[in-house]
Amino acid sequence: MNRITLSFFILFYSFSSFSQDVFDLGVRTIEIFFNEPNWDDTLDQYYSNNTGQRLIADSILIDGIADQDVGIKYKGNSSYNVNNTKNPLNIKLDYINNGQSIDGYNVLKLSNGFRDPSFVREVLSYQIAREYMPAPKATYANVYINGNLMGLYTCVQSIDDDFTNENFYERKGPFFKVENTGFSISGCGGQLGILEYYNDTNCYQRAYEMQSSNDWWKLGNFLDTFNNHFTSIENVMDIDRTLWMMALENLTVCLDGPINSIPHNFYLFKDNNGRFSPILWDMNMSFGSFTNGLSSPVSVSDLQDLDIFHKFNDPKNKLTSQIFANERYRKMYVAHMRTIMNEKFTNNSYINIASNLQSIISSYVSSDPNTFYSYVQFTDNLNSSVGSNPVVGISELMDSRVSFLASLNEFSFQPPIISNISSNPTNVLPHTTINITAQITDANYVYLGYRFKFSEKFQKVQMYDDGNHGDGIAGDGVYGSTIDVDARDVQYYIYSENNNAGIFSPERAEKEFHQIPVVSGLVINEIMAANFSSVSDQSGEFDDWVELYNGGNNTINLNGFYLSDNENDLTKWSFPNVSIQPNDYLIIWCDTAGTSQSGLHTTYRLSADQEEVYLSDPSGVVIDAVHFVNMNSDIAYARVPNGYGPFVNQLHSQNLSNNTVASDNNFTILSEMRVYPNPSNNRIYILGTSATTLEVFNIIGESVFKSENVNSINIADWKSGIYFVKSGKSVVKFIKQ
């Protein structure tokens, strides 16, 4: 076995251990204890009543961590049966005790493996989905009730306020679960369709379950625009997230949902930009295990050759009929599907992930007393159809489906080629105008999407090759657009199309994007808003902090400068008479201590969920600003390269160059190389490698990856934990979530 040298191996153990949470990939042990001896009958009765009532568990242990007075109910539709011993469960930890949670999550949703002999469909689907769109986290749990083993479940994150805060940076907003399963309501034109508009909000109240309050009229306004004023759709709907969801569901033949005119199994959430987004849900019957809605009898080839514009002509399915009627959205949809297909299926990444999942749960499946399928069917269903009511094998479905899709004109057409993306000027100062350009071949339409904050929507402006938009000579294949910047870094992507096909750069846009740092000599260089154990202040306290860096040639006296977390109150905290030398750092603790402690302390704290930091000069002009979201515990947000690069997540390097990744025990690994995103649960990108060979080691020094001339690695099927990338003499630590 290849292991790293002893000197490097010692460094592995200098880092603090990676904290686990309930949705880290593995098998949780959940033990439920009811005082009620007839708990199963009671849960069946509550399910039948359909009032949301829960049975109180006296206690519950999750990997040995105890909670009391937890509310539990059965859930599911076809996966629930009164005769089942192992029914799906919904566990609400804060049902009685407000704030009770496990790792910050207060609801766990457990699926029982119904109609999935492989037992990987749900977790696999969500693992893939999260690389492209908001989607729940998922893992496994072995469940005991009153000491009796119920069996193995998938354990899925609830789509709730915590989910929307994590993915939309907004806890509250109009929020609906699409629940209708085909009912007809008098006065609503027969069976309710998908995203249909009705004048009477009573029609919606049968089709949707409102998760917010008094928002029926907002849903009605959205559906009015969607149905009757579609040219304004991007004002009220996040079309990009919609297209990603539709592309994934169609590609993976997930027919128990909206793309198959099944009016349930998705949510709608309205973000702070006034746009509704559909949210993927209930993927336990993905990869062809649900066949209702197709012409009977359904053959394997029907699933493999599913039309990529399935249900485009169904008048009751406005999601497909409206969106697929728009030629540009069709091209974007195909571009997204092509990206998922190339990254996950053409290279067999999906089956490697599925095999890894099965290896994790194999022993639990073999000892499950209430499984719906045999162990042989469990292993065989990765590749072959099994069961008396056959469930298609995952690779049996997808290998042929990928071949089918590749044969279609939509996937044979060549999209434009986007290259040589740049900004002019290269070094962008705050409050200036810049040109963003790209060399694009074979295009007849190009737009630039840009924003300055994670929580903002991308503004779209057309790019031109006319010599008037910073693009140089007209007709030379260089497209350009001019935008005004403030003091925040620019996040942007490019979309281009010709008569036949479209393409994004980066291809995972809008989930991923390019960045342009906007900096002057004095910058906000590093931030830590969840400092629990990394760096203590002069009083030994672990508080939020901001690091400034002076990249100029002159000393700057900060007397009269301001630091704030509120763009409407830029003078929230003023600097005393303190200076920062050239190529030096200054730490400000955001802990409300003010002048009561030595050092610099503001009068406010930072929020790890979402926050902005503004640095203003004495005249009130913002000279640097940073927006961040979902900052992980003891992880910093830092400019790399130091002083002028875009922000990335990394271990802190307080009072050191951000090209230096420092451990909690003051070991340092010097490197110009950087890895992002960090932490990551899917793919990492490596910049600044110093050698052609790149190798990755796990926490005990084993080599887990080695390749030549690569700048990204798919880590979706790796175990959670700490890893190190080594290229030449450069070493960078990263965390696989």
Image (cartoon, rainbow, N blue to C red):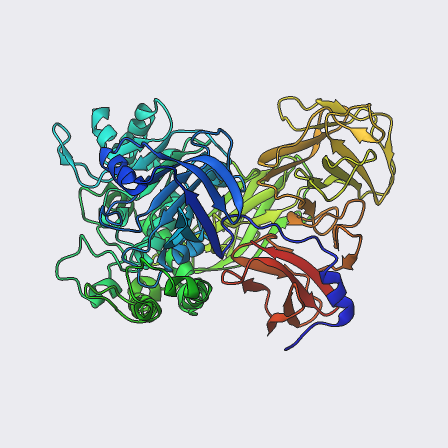
The answer to whether 537 appears left or right of 49 in the picture is: right
Q: Between 552 and 279, which is closer to the camera in this rendering? A: 279
Q: How far across and down, in percent of the image, does residue 264 sit? A: 27, 42
The answer to whether 659 appears left or right of 126 in the picture is: right
Q: Between 54 and 515, which is closer to the camera in this rendering? A: 54
Task: Work out whether residue 472 can be spotted.
Answer: yes
Image quarter of residue 626: top right
Count of numbered tags: 0
Return the residue found at the far bottom: 1
Q: How far across and down, in percent of the image, does residue 166 sit? A: 50, 40
The answer to whether 370 appears left or right of 96 in the picture is: left
Q: How far across and down, in percent of the image, does residue 430 sit? A: 68, 37
Task: Work out whether residue 468 can be spotted.
Answer: no
Q: How far across and down, in percent of the image, does residue 401 sit? A: 30, 66
**Residue 213 higher or lower than 108, as above or below:** above
**Residue 714 higher or lower than 183, as above or below:** below
Screen quadrant of the N terminus:
bottom right
**Residue 500 higher or lower than 169, as above or below:** below
